[in-house]
Amino acid sequence: MTINTELLASCWTSAGNTGPSFADEMSPVSLRDRIEAAGRTGWSGFGLFHKDLIEARETIGLPTLGAILRDNGMKHVEFEFLTDWWADGAARAESDRIRTHMFEAAEELGVRTVKVSSDLSPNPQPYAAYTEHFAALATDAEQHGVRVALEFMPMASPRTVQEAADIVRNAGARAGGLCIDIWHVYRAGTSYEELAAAIDPEMVFVVELNDGARTPIGSLWDDTVNSRKYCGEGDFDVAAFATTILSTGYKGYWGVEIISALHRDTPVEEGLRRAHDTALSALSAAVDPTAIGNTGSR
């Protein structure tokens, strides 16, 4: 079995001392420094938070950002994180404003994929409503030459890969697909066999690697933003997850999303190197299970 071992540093992996729901969520490290550190540590791709794009537009400009990405070997670039695409009122108006900015920036930078959130609100909508809104979102994305990847979360709606795959399948839009993060799969209690059975190969746009303890530390939200581990240092069996994804026909690059207190306290370049090298070891173990000692169990 051969594997595409190109790795993309998801936005929080390079962001330093910030994370989801942290103050204004802006990285204290400049985009140039983050991208150059990613280039020095072997990455082939880079994830940008929508606020990174706003900062770049207002400071260095998107053409300069594109040049920095290319000069540092970033072949793959993703944007995130569009929320409230299913909402109405003021929340939807703000979502549409961010959507327009991300789609226009994606066209200018040649970015292919935008990650979109599942619904973390306490009042989820019927799944038919998510399907309708997702179909419209994906149709709009296609008109801009991009695609949208729905990221399910076990504390949101949709909460499982099965539920998210049904939304994507029923939406029937070519530019609508899935973001499959191992953390969300494991914490939703989905076996890797169930994962493979739930998806169609063409709907998988983004796959993300990380690791974690067998049981959550605190709430699911606390665990996902404070206690993720580097690949191979927890109980998720990252190699088995990668093998499962590959068995569906996936041939793309791999995102690595490390969000944790430990990672935030680590200097950015050191954290990027550790995240890259441990993910690469886990992928190597998907080819040769003896390549690493700890693959956990699932």
Image (spheres, helix red, strand yellow):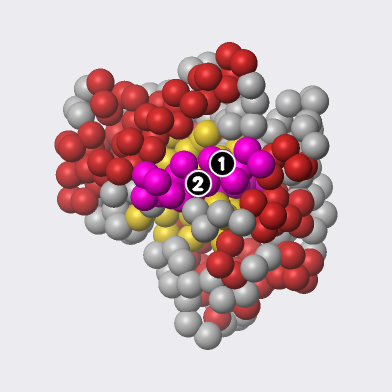
User: Residue 53: x percent and y percent?
Assistant: 34, 30
- In the rendering, which numbered label is found on residue 136? 1
User: Residue 293: x percent and y percent?
Assistant: 63, 71
Q: Pointer 2: what residue?
A: 139
Residue 129 figure quarter: top right
| CB-based contact (under 8 Å), mark 2 and mark 1 | yes
User: Within the magenta stretch, is there residue 140?
Assistant: yes
What residue is shown at x 34% (from left), y 25% (from top)?
54
User: Residue 232: x percent and y percent?
Assistant: 61, 61
How many other residues sit within 10 Å of disc 2, few (<14), some (14-19) or many (≥20)?
many
266 lies left or right of 169: left
Taking depth in this image into account, of 180 and 220 the one nearest to the observer is: 180
| Three-letter amino acid code at the position of disc 1 | Ala
Secondary element at tag 2: helix
What residue is shown at x 61% (from left), y 56% (from top)?
172
What residue is shown at x 69% (from left), y 39% (from top)?
130
User: Residue 45: x percent and y percent?
Assistant: 36, 53
Instruction: Give the magenta part as a residue range.
Output: 132-155
Taking depth in this image into account, of 57 and 96 the one nearest to the observer is: 96
Q: CA distance from mark 2 to mark 1?
A: 5 Å
User: Within the magenta stretch, is there residue 149?
Assistant: yes
Q: Is residue 23 visible?
A: yes
Secondary element at tag 1: helix
What residue is shown at x 29% (from left), y 49% (from top)?
110
| Three-letter amino acid code at the position of disc 2 | Thr
- In the rendering, which numbered label is found on residue 50? none
